[in-house]
């Protein structure tokens, strides 16, 4: 249909054309060939898996992969459960006006850019921040968490929690309100305490949503975001802040080693697809619906 | 549910107090930083000196940081760039998305299964930074504000949200309009859009926030500082330690304190979002859910 055509055109041009453009990962990109980058992409020499070989021999790449996977694992443990807990807590607030007010406040940081989020953290917890001053006033020394590479993983998780944990409750709140209230009533009549109702009705009721989001997160195991790490690289150093996405940027674009960078990006994309496929298979095996059904 | 169901036991005092404290802390964690930034930006030199830095308790209101900020080009120019990109980008995105969502919501339109599949598939993988960069540069968009708009003009999630909502509009309504002789465009304009104002507003907000927060694309494609949007300017003042443009106002000998000027830059970056947000916020759940269920 005619109406869909313009949007589909944009999608093809800015999503599918670059997806195909990943062939550059198998080439030795030479920017001086032809007239402009697109011709240069076509005219450059094929090098087969040469870029990948260099990539796999590069210790910096494996450092970035390791940082990324550690951050993902850390966030699955310390971030992922929080929106669920917060949603259950909010769901138990009886006054719908109060609940609406709290929701309005905790959704807000989702709409802030990473520059803003990091600015707020710096102004509160940084060496010269509000809390560091308050701590100093009562005679304690404030640890400078904004520049300490050893605690960086906790810092980025705290930032992610502040930005998105509130927003993340939306989907769980909806799942919670879809649970049939007569189940609770029957359980209460049978003498189940509130904790038993939470364990036997609430959690099973929202399990499909939990599994779905966990699969999506696992599929994204190699992407933890770009801007958050790019912005804090100067403060804590590349040793802690280099993740796969920033590696692609520095190696590919800043040093103009495009074929090599594209190889790293393509590696990430392919692993991501494999991960999401595997996680989905697992979900089916455990009788969950997963991202797509078969 | 605004009354406690009769079968539920009365909450214990400890449980109730614990819950209230937790919820209070969670909301305070969002409000305190915002509050402190805005208060500091409105504080005089004495107040900031007395607090030793960030101010929490306001003592009077002093607009000199803002006056000084707007007396120079750097921030006004960046705000202007951000406004243009946000308004132009949102207008383009919402037009494309509404049209496509409507097209895909009518069963039997040409190739709609294939097209829908193509849109859904974008959730599973991104195109990759390097090829996208080479394409955008190859199209000659470098150092052009369109580089902040065109690559992100259509977002599949937003499209699915709108399509799901359009599909819930009763078919009889549309059929009866057709019988009265309305074409597709009139149906869209006079029936579908008026019925979906709230969801369209939410999607427009999602797009607008995306454009207002443009950062990475600006780093990639805009080399001239005159083109830099507000997020980049904010970063250079706060995270890169560049001195903000403090000028002494007429009649005073010293410029307003640097910290107040810095916080004023933070405030002007946040405030546009804060103004639009309350009007759209109550419709979030509806929009996010229709999308989540179909996607």
Image (cartoon, coloured by chain):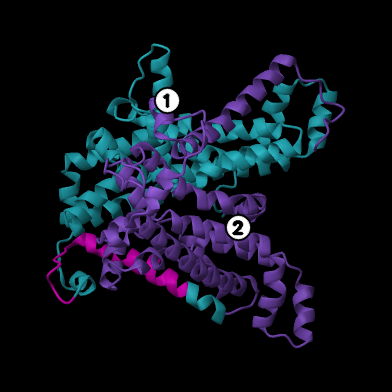
Q: Residue furthest bottom?
A: B181
Magenta stretch bounds: A8-35
**Residue A203 visible in the displayed image:** no
Q: Earlier in the sequence, mark 1 or mark 2?
A: 1
Q: Is residue B14 left or right of residue A145?
A: right
Q: Is residue A9 magenta?
A: yes
Q: Colour of chain B?
A: purple
Look at the image and say whether residue B59 sits in the magenta stretch. no
Crowding at dot 1, Cα within 10 Å, few <14 / some 14-19 / many 20+, comes out as some
Q: Which residue is mark 1?
A: B51
Q: Is residue A176 left or right of residue B257?
A: right
Residue B143 rendering spot, x and y as whole percentages = 28, 66
The residue that appears at 51% across and 53% down in the rendered structure is B272
Q: Secondary structure at mark 2?
A: helix
- Point out the image quarter for the N terminus of chain B: top right
Q: Secondary structure at mark 1?
A: helix
Q: Which chain is cyan?
A: A
Locate residue A198 relative to residue A265 in the image: left or right.
right
Q: Nearer the viewer, residue A282 or A275?
A: A275
**Which x, y percent locates residue B293?**
63, 53
Q: CA distance from mark 1 to mark 2?
A: 40 Å
Q: Position of residue B95 (x, y in %)?
A: 54, 72
Circle 1 chain: B
Q: Main secondary structure of the magenta part?
A: helix
* Chain letter of the residue carrying label 2: B
What residue is shown with label 2? B202
Residue beneath the point at 37% across and 48% down? B68
Between B96 and B225, the residue placed more toward the observer is B225
- Pair 1/2: label in front: 1
């Amino acid at each position: 249909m005619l109406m869909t055509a313009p949007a589909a055109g944009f999608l093809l041009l800015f999503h599918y054309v670059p997806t195909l453009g990943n062939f550059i990962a198998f080439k030795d990109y030479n920017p001086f060939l032809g007239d402009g980058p697109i011709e240069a992409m076509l005219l450059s020499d094929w090098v087969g898996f040469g870029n990948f070989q260099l990539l796999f021999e590069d210790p910096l790449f494996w450092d970035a992969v390791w940082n990324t996977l550690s951050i993902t694992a850390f966030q699955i443990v310390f971030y992922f459960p929080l929106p669920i807990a917060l949603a259950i807590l909010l769901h138990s607030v009886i006054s719908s006006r109060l609940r609406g007010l709290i929701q309005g406040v905790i959704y807000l940081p989702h709409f802030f850019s990473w520059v803003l989020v990091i600015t707020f953290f710096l102004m509160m917890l940084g060496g010269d921040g509000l809390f560091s001053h308050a701590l100093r006033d009562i005679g304690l020394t404030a640890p400078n968490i904004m520049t300490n590479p050893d605690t960086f993983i906790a810092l980025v998780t705290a930032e992610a929690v502040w930005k998105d944990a509130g927003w993340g409750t939306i989907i769980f709140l909806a799942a919670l309100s879809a649970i049939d209230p007569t189940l609770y009533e029957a359980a209460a009549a049978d003498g189940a305490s509130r904790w038993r109702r939470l364990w036997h009705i609430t959690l099973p009721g929202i399990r499909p949503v939990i599994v779905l989001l966990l699969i999506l997160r696992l599929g994204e195991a190699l992407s933890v975001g770009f801007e958050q790490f790019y912005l804090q690289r100067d403060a804590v150093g590349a040793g802690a802040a280099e993740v796969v996405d920033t590696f692609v940027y520095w190696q590919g674009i800043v040093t103009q080693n495009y074929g090599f960078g594209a190889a790293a990006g393509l590696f990430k994309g392919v692993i991501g697809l494999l991960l999401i496929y595997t996680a989905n298979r697992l979900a089916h095996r455990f009788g969950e619906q997963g991202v797509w059904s078969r | 549910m605004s009354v406690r169901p009769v079968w539920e036991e009365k909450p214990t005092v400890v449980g109730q107090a614990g819950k209230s404290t937790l919820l209070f802390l969670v909301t305070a964690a969002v409000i305190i930083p915002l509050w402190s930034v805005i208060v500091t930006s409105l504080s005089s030199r004495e107040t900031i000196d007395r607090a030793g830095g960030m101010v929490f308790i306001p003592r009077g209101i002093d607009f000199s940081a803002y006056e000084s900020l707007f007396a120079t080009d750097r921030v006004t120019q960046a705000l202007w760039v951000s406004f243009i990109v946000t308004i132009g980008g949102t207008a383009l995105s919402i037009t494309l998305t509404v049209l496509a969502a409507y097209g895909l919501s009518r069963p039997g339109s040409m190739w709609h299964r294939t097209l829908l599949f193509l849109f859904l598939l974008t959730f599973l993988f991104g195109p990759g930074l390097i090829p996208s960069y080479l394409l955008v540069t190859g199209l000659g968009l470098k150092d052009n504000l369109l580089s902040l708009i065109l690559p992100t003009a259509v977002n599949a999630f937003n499209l699915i949200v709108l399509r799901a909502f359009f599909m819930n509009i009763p078919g009889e309504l549309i059929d009866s309009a057709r019988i009265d002789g309305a074409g597709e465009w009139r149906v869209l304009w006079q029936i579908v859009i008026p019925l979906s104002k709230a969801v369209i507003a939410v999607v427009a907000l999602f797009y607008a926030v995306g454009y207002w927060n443009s950062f990475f694309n600006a780093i990639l494609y805009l080399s001239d500082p005159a083109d830099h949007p507000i997020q980049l300017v904010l970063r250079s003042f706060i995270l890169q330690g560049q001195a903000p443009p403090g000028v002494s106002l007429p009649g005073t000998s010293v410029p307003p304190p640097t910290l107040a000027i810095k916080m004023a830059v933070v405030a002007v970056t946040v405030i546009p979002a804060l103004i639009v947000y309350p009007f759209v916020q109550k419709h979030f759940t509806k929009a996010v859910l229709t999308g989540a269920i179909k996607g």
